[in-house]
Image: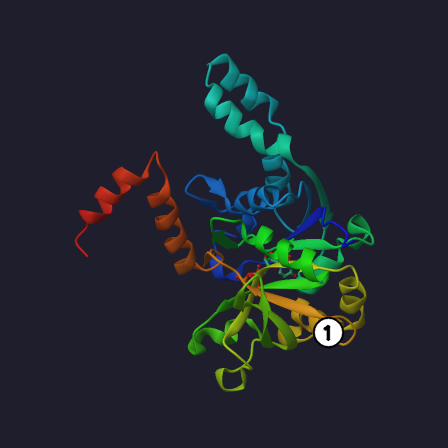
Amino acid sequence: MVPKVRKAVFPAAGLGTRFLPATKAQPKEMLPLVDKPLIQYGVEEAIRSGIQNIIIVTGRGKSAIEDHFDVSFELEHLLESRNKMETLAIVRDISDMINVAYVRQKEALGLGHAVLRARELVGREPLAVVLSDDVIYSEVPCLRQLLDVYEFFGASVLALMEVPSDNISAYGVVEAEPVSHNGEEDRVFRIRNLVEKPKPSEAPSNLAIIGRYVLTPEIFDSIEAIEPGSGGEIQLTDALKHLLCSRPIYGYRFQGTRYDAGDKLGFLKATVEFALRRKDLGGEFREYLKGLEL
Ligand code: UTP
């Protein structure tokens, strides 16, 4: 029996330099996409995937994230007294649905280093890792898609996406072979090697790792074992490479659309597309866009 994944770690302690000055005093995970902070999309994805225990790794701007997922008595009282019950439900829903714990990464020493901060809270259990600046729109939540593969193989699973060669050096890239699974030949991959931010000429494939992972607990030993890598940071990709020496790792080319909302252009694309999909805003917003002289 494969152990159930009950906890999701949300690293949110990066410096967000691509989004300055907006991220000078608040984490990029609090930037709103239409009307919800990025991190809430990730948390809702975890909930829809069956995970309610959320561990957030914070750096600066900790209080904004904590306050967001906490009860706001003043605000709730005000909404109640004005009989704004729908808005009240929106404000309450998210904090009612999850157990949140916070752990601090004092210095932004890399994604691997951030994940390692959650070790005590995770214990010897498998975990999900969600980078909430990767916002994913899909019918079946991306994390659920990964969990299904994890539950079948009982091994770590990374979300993969095809990326054009001129963008590949922004990602961790895998060397992998397809594995036939559930009648599909090109979704599940057995990973053979991983390279962090390769030059296009040195990329082992066009399959990049994006911000959703299901990991077995041995990943923590691997993170502890590695030295700083690309950019002088403790990279999760390097730890995965270390883990690969002793455990199998799979990749899943997930179904859905991923937006890099930690990047200005990616954030704008996500904002427009999420707004267009909204029942309450989409119609009017579409008309507005059509009227623009482009
Ligand atoms: P990014 O690679 O996007 O880095 O981190 P960043 O520092 O946040 O942003 P830029 O590139 O300077 O604009 C990927 C994820 O890992 C977290 C970030 O918060 C983000 O969710 N992270 C990164 C940490 O929690 N700690 C770190 O030391 C680095």
Q: Position of residue 209 (x, y in %)?
A: 57, 67
Res. 202 visible in picture: yes
Q: Position of residue 109 (x, y in %)?
A: 68, 64
Q: Residue at x 56, y 17 (%)?
A: 77
On screen, residue 141 versus residue 283, left or right, reads: right
Q: Is residue 204 above or below residue 45?
A: below
**Kind of residue at badge 1:** Leu
Q: Position of residue 277 (x, y in %)?
A: 36, 43
Pick the front one: 251 or 97:
251
Mark 1 vs ligand 1: CB under 8 Å?
Answer: no
Res. 12 visible in picture: no
Pick the front one: 203 or 199:
203
The part of the image, by quadrant, that contains residue 165 is bottom left
Q: Is residue 80 above or below residue 195?
A: above
Q: Residue at x 56, y 76 (%)?
A: 197
Residue that badge 1 annotates: 244
Q: Residue furthest front?
A: 183
Q: Position of residue 267 (x, y in %)?
A: 42, 54
Q: Is residue 280 above or below residue 54?
A: above
Q: Residue at x 57, y 64 (%)?
A: 252
Looking at the rendered image, the quarter that the C terminus falls into is bottom left
Pick the front one: 137 or 78:
137
